[in-house]
Image: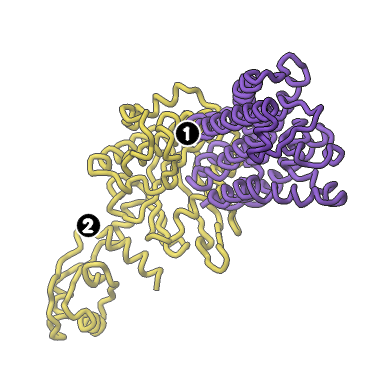
């Protein structure tokens, strides 16, 4: 048990003693601030000026009854989830790239303890990034909505439950990153996979899956879709036809946890067990 | 300090695909002495050490610390300090590097400053390792091994990249560690690099043991030799063959197993071979080492 705590402490120190965590954290905050603030203001403007919006080609008509605030706030996770995945993957691939597995395995020869500590530490780091991202999306989105006289819904417990689930999603994404890094120890390959999958492959798959009911029932198990289901709302949900295709929030969480655990276990049984030379 | 434990390598074999890097290697390293683990590049030294430290799985055989494999040691950093090829995250400072591994091994933070002082890099401790010279990296690597104040030290090429002052320093340092009763195993591809600091030598070539014993036993092997060279080495070799003087080919000429240079010189004279150098081998260690290593290679 002590060994687990020691490895966990060491993994946290590894994260905070290099620059990557605040580079990625800073990018996440800036990215979310621009999108949540900008989208909040844009929605406010289109609702106040429907004719001008239509004239400008703005066809993002918001269906009545859809609350806007959650859509704006969940930019933190629906856009920001790539950051904890990257940081989690780098926590593993960096050890291969800088060949620091040697001192790491000398300090703790039981490799599964090291990988377990990475998994747990990146859950926490992901939650930290999630907290920063939601603080930003609420901090930038709420004033933007309020400026156009729209409801910020900050007095609703549903909003804060959504924030909590969003932070949980970000934590799970950090753990998925660890699993991915263990499966693909080549750092460049892992980064390319994260960017390509989250930014291109999955959005396209989700769009294509939404064309029929059969594919939609499969598409909701895609990690991004599961993440949105867990958080409860995202700007994807206004593009998809209905909420019936989406998983329950807890199912979404289990899908993410399952991906993280399976990837980490397979990586741990393969690349992680190889000779270190 | 943990007490020195012997290192025991028994029948160790490691194959990488079709390549046999280490071939049925057996030797013991005793506490209280500095043992040089020698062999040319590619002889299998690093592979042997990586197997010993649980980083590489052996094909056959065992490598233990007094019977216990590295991975089964209860608190490995406090029993064994190992510095393989210096590997650090370039963006981390030396102090943070040491903290990361002190934490992982469950050692108190105070050890970090202590080992920084011990290897003399305290004033650079808060710089990123990316800016470190090879010599500073070697010292940081050594500092990492000392964190747990271990009874056994396993150092792979620790002298590589050190300046003359650093070499002098590490020789004294290894000596003092052994004098405290620790087991010290130091690998090198150059005997001359370690001959002033080692008591025992283990020499391997092509993954096989060619010599294990005291440094002075190597000197005995080297005694009674003459080194002779000629612009025409083939003719010289033929001359020595004709005179029935055994020899091996060394770096600076042929090493004849004959104590008297006059006898060797006469053999060349009789055959009419021009001699460019002829002298008794003074410190024959390096030549003896090369002869052992090359002999095995043929």
Q: Is residue A272 above or below residue B131?
A: below
Dot 2: what SS? loop
The reply, left or right, for residue B38 in relation to residue B256 is right
Q: Nearer the viewer, residue B260 or B157?
A: B157
Expressed as whole percent of the image width and height from the top left, the position of residue B8 reads 52, 48
Q: What number is the disc on residue A18?
A: 1
Residue at which label 2 appears: B283
Number of dots carrying numbers:
2
Q: Is residue A235 above or below residue B212?
A: above
Residue B105 appears in view? no
Expressed as whole percent of the image width and height from the top left, the position of residue B51 reads 54, 51
Q: Nearer the viewer, residue A225 or A259?
A: A225
Q: CA distance from mark 2 to mark 1?
A: 50 Å
The reply, left or right, for residue A136 in relation to residue A230 is left
Residue in view at x 16 percent, y 80 percent: B268
Q: Tell me the quadrant of the picture where the C terminus of chain B can be found.
A: bottom left
Residue B281 appears in view? yes
Rendered shade, chain B = yellow
The reply, left or right, for residue B39 in relation to residue A164 is left
The letter of the purple chain is: A
Residue in view at x 30 percent, y 41 percent: B171
């Amino acid at each position: 048990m002590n060994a687990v705590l020691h490895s966990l402490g060491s993994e946290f120190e590894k994260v905070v003693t290099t620059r990557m965590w605040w580079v990625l954290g800073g990018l996440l905050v800036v990215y979310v601030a621009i999108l949540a603030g900008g989208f909040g203001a844009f929605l406010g403007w289109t609702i106040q000026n429907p004719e001008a919006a239509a004239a400008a080609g703005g066809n993002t008509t918001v269906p009545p009854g859809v609350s806007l605030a959650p859509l704006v706030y969940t930019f933190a996770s629906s856009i920001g989830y790539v950051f904890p995945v990257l940081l989690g993957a780098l926590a593993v691939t960096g050890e291969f790239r800088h060949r620091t597995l040697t001192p790491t395995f000398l300090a703790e020869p039981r490799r599964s303890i090291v990988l377990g500590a990475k998994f747990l530490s990146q859950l926490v780091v992901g939650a930290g990034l999630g907290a920063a991202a939601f603080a930003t999306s609420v901090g930038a989105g709420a004033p933007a909505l309020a400026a156009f006289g729209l409801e910020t819904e900050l007095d609703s417990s549903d909003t804060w439950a959504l924030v909590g689930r969003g932070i949980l999603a970000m934590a799970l994404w950090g753990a998925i990153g660890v699993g991915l890094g263990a499966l693909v120890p080549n750092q460049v390959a892992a980064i390319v996979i994260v960017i390509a999958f989250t930014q291109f492959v999955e959005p396209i798959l989700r769009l294509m899956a939404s064309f029929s009911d059969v594919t939609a029932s499969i598409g909701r198990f895609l990690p991004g879709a599961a993440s949105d289901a867990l958080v409860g709302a995202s700007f994807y949900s206004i593009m998809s036809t209905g909420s019936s295709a989406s998983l329950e929030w807890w199912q979404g969480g289990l899908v993410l946890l399952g991906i993280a655990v399976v990837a980490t276990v397979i990586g741990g049984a393969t690349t992680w067990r190889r000779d270190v030379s | 300090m943990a007490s020195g434990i012997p290192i025991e390598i028994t029948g160790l074999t490691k194959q990488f695909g079709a390549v046999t890097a280490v071939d049925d290697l057996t030797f013991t390293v005793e506490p209280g002495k500095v043992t040089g683990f020698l062999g040319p590049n590619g002889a299998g030294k690093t592979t042997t050490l990586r197997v010993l430290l649980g980083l590489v799985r052996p094909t056959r055989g065992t490598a233990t610390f007094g019977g216990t494999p590295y991975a089964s040691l209860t608190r490995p950093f406090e029993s064994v300090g190992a510095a393989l090829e210096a590997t650090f995250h370039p963006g981390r400072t030396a102090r943070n590097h040491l903290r990361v591994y002190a934490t992982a091994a469950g050692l108190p933070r105070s050890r970090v400053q202590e080992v920084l002082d011990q290897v003399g890099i305290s004033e650079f401790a808060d710089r990123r390792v990316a800016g470190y010279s090879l010599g500073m990296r070697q010292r940081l690597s050594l500092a990492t091994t000392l964190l747990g104040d271990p009874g056994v030290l396993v150092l792979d090429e620790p002298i590589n990249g050190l300046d003359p002052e650093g070499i002098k320093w590490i020789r004294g340092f290894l000596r003092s560690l052994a004098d405290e009763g620790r087991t010290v195993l130091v690998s090198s591809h150059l005997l001359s690099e370690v001959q002033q600091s080692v008591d025992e030598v283990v020499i391997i070539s092509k993954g096989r043991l060619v010599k294990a014993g005291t440094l002075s036993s190597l000197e005995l092997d080297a005694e009674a030799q003459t080194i002779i060279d000629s612009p025409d080495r083939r003719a010289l070799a033929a001359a020595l063959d004709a005179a029935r003087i055994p020899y091996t080919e060394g770096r600076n000429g042929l090493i004849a197993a004959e104590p008297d240079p006059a006898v060797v010189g006469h053999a060349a004279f009789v055959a009419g071979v021009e001699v460019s150098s002829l002298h008794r081998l003074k410190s024959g260690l390096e030549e003896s080492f090369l002869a052992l290593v090359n002999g095995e290679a043929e």
